[in-house]
Amino acid sequence: EYLRVPYVEGAGELTVFCAAMIGSGLGFLWFNCHPAQVFMGDTGSLTIGAIIAVIALIVRKELLIPLLCGVFFIETLSVIMQVSYFKYTRTKTGIGQRIFKMAPLHHHFQKLGFHESKIVSRFWILGILPLLLLSIPILLSSSSREAPWLPAPVALPGRVGEWLRRAWCGGKPS
């Protein structure tokens, strides 16, 4: 364990791959700011999602995907809900009905009249919040002896604290 990051045997090359993915993502974001010069379609976004899922499986943190990738998870769920509900109502009534004006969810907000820049900035905020929430276990597991600038460990009561400890420690209770 180094810098409070658990060692995963055989995942050394994964660091180089993750760094390359981060670099390519930053390059994409650089040229994708408003007005966008480069666009990513379904093929690119699905590939990135699959890569994130495989990395989570390799480092044994697959239970954190819905939290860390909250915006992407909700976007995917909105499509699943829209298609399922449309098919269900079409078989029951003969006319398919929709939950959202358009799926995925960000298009629904566009149809409601929100400007694209506002949707993007709000989704950025909603994407950063789970990261901050999942940083709590780092503070909970640190001791003032190892990191004097951090507060002493705090124990969260009940199932929430145990779930956070298990999720952060890879299934091992503290």
Image: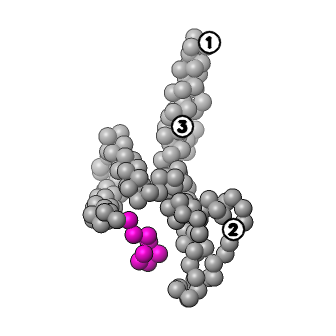
In three-dimensional space, the C-alpha distance between marks 3 and 2, rounded to whole angstroms, equals: 32 Å
* Residue 149: percent from left, percent from top: 56, 86
Q: Is residue 118 left or right of residue 3?
A: right
Identify the mark nearer the N-term, 3 or 2: 3
Up-down relation of residue 37 to residue 140 (above or below): above
Residue 69 visible in rendering: no
Q: Using residue 158 as the reference point, say whether residue 98 is left or right of it.
A: left
Give the amino acid at mark 2: Leu
Residue 74 forms part of the magenta stretch: no
How far separated are the C-alphas under marks 2 and 1?
49 Å
- Identified at 39% across, 69% down, the residue is 7
Q: Residue at x 67, y 60 (%)?
A: 160
Question: Helix or strand or loop: what does disc 2 sit on?
Answer: loop
Q: In the rendered structure, are the residues bearing label 2 and label 1 in contact, judged by CB atoms less than 8 Å apart?
A: no
Residue 22 x, y percent position in the rendering: 33, 61
Residue 78 is labelled as 3
> Of label 1 and label 3, which has the lower sequence position?
3
Magenta residues span 1-8
Sort mark 3 into few (<14), some (14-19) or many (20+) by Cα contacts within 10 Å.
Answer: many
Whether tag 3 and tag 2 are in contact, CB under 8 A, the answer is no
Q: Position of residue 132 (x, y in %)?
A: 56, 66
Query: Of the residues shown, which amino acid type is indicated by label 1?
Result: Thr
Tell me which secondary structure the magenta stretch mostly adopts.
Answer: loop
In this figure, which residue is indicated by the disc labeled 1?
93
The disc at residue 156 is: 2
